[in-house]
């Protein structure tokens, strides 16, 4: 789903695919599992693309492909206009400094044996950023930028709360002054009250530093809050993508409509919410035709055999569905 933007995209992902092979049992032959089928999107400088979908939809694999942590089986990833180099190569390491990842579980992401200042400093050492004294000062500045103090510098991860640990992970990610942060379920492991603080921190940092972000989450409310554009994924494909305000006011794909209806804002009135039924997506049992057709309340005969192609239905609004008539939240409520 290519879309025009005022300035060249910082990241362009074009028709990437990723297939794994998984065994159902110890003695069974490995079977192909298509985690990402044909995904394209761009991320503009200083903007956030939210990728939302249920578990198993391929959103985390998409994030890893965008980071270059995994090589796609097909398609291309361009960062700042050049193809992403091979994983682990010197050119990849140079670009990797400009693309950082914030993990879901901060405790797993941090080294329990090292005080947090040492872990933030490690990034500066690896990328040879600044001199010895400058690196110490930069560590303190990074701690301050994420709402921690010098008193936290000598603490170990287990001495911090979950929210504080995620702040350390964010500080470490910012150490190399990246242009792009890939945040994979960054608040999913946190208490609800702490989630809002970390989300606000990420939004403030984006404003201050001009970061671009890919924000991957199953939580529509959070994605809505942070994203300029939103891509909805289902079984390895983007089924709908549009500007955040637009997609939440005018969802067109039945899956997006069900997601939005299950997470309305206080001002949205949905009299007959379209609830998701059936089994959640299983990449190992991909149906023919439209991948959503076994759960779709609007399924038609064509949907069972012909995969819908993504097309631009209005400026910057892309949809992969055989339905073509506009459907609004008002129509859903009538
Ligand atoms: Fe539903 Fe058919 Fe659209 Fe798929 S293509 S979402 S099954 S109407």
Image (tube, rainbow, N blue to C red):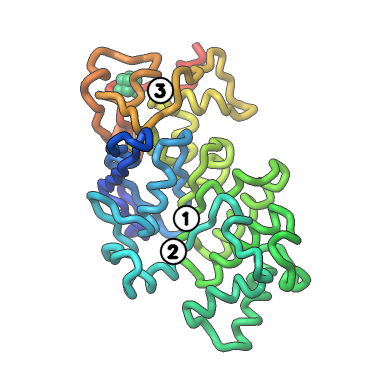
Element type at marker 1?
strand
Q: Is residue 325 visible?
A: no
User: Quadrant location of the N terminus?
Assistant: top left
**Badge 2 or badge 3: first in the primary sequence:** 2
Query: Could you say which is closer to the camera, residue 182 or residue 30?
Result: 30
**Badge 2 or badge 1: first in the primary sequence:** 2
Report, in whole angstroms, how far the alpha carbon at label 3 lies from the one at label 1: 27 Å
Query: Could you say which is closer to the camera, residue 30 or residue 293?
Result: 30
Which residue, given by chain and number where applicable, does mark 1 sit on? 182
Which residue, given by chain and number where applicable, does mark 3 sit on? 254
Q: Quadrant of ligand 1?
A: top left
Q: Is residue 5 left or right of residue 214?
A: left
**Percent x, y of residue 306:** 21, 23
Q: Is residue 99 visible?
A: yes
Q: Do the residues under discs 2 and 3 have CB atoms within 8 angstroms?
A: no
Which residue, given by chain and number where applicable, does mark 2 sit on? 99
**Can you name the residue that lies furthest to the front here?**
27
**Percent x, y of residue 282:** 39, 30
**Percent x, y of residue 329:** 48, 22
Q: Do the residues under discs 2 and 1 have CB atoms within 8 angstroms?
A: yes
Q: Is mark 3 within 8 Å of ligand 1?
A: yes
């Amino acid at each position: 789903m290519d879309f025009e933007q005022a300035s060249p995209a910082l990241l362009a992902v074009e028709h990437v695919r990723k297939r794994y092979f998984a065994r159902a049992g110890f003695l069974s032959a490995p079977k192909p599992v298509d985690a990402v089928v044909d995904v394209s999107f761009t991320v503009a400088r200083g903007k956030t693309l939210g990728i939302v979908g249920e578990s198993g939809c391929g959103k985390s694999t998409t994030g890893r492909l965008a980071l270059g942590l995994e090589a796609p089986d097909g398609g291309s990833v361009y960062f700042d206009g050049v193809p992403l180099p091979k994983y682990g190569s010197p050119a990849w390491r140079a670009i990797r400094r400009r693309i950082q990842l914030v993990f879901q579980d901060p405790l797993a992401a941090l080294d329990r044996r090292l005080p947090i200042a040492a872990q933030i400093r490690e990034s500066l050492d690896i990328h040879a950023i600044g001199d010895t004294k400058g690196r110490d000062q930069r560590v303190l500045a990074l701690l301050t930028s994420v709402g921690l103090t010098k008193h936290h510098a000598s603490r170990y991860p287990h001495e911090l709360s979950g929210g504080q640990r995620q702040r350390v992970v964010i500080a470490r990610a910012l150490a190399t002054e990246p242009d792009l942060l890939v945040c994979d379920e960054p608040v999913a492991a946190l208490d609800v009250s702490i989630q809002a603080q970390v989300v606000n921190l990420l939004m403030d940092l984006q404003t201050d530093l001009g970061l671009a972000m890919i924000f991957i989450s199953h939580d529509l409310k959070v994605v809505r809050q942070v994203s300029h554009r939103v891509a909805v994924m289902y079984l390895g494909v983007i089924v709908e993508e549009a500007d955040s305000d637009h997609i939440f006011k005018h969802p067109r794909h039945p899956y997006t409509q069900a997601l939005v209806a299950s997470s309305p804002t206080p001002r949205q009135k949905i009299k007959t919410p379209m609830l998701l039924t059936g089994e959640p997506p299983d990449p190992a049992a991909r149906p023919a035709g439209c991948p959503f057709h076994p759960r779709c309340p609007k399924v038609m005969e064509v949907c069972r055999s012909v995969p819908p192609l993504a097309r631009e239905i209005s400026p910057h609004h892309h949809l992969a569905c055989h339905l073509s008539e506009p459907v609004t939240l008002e129509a859903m409520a009538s």
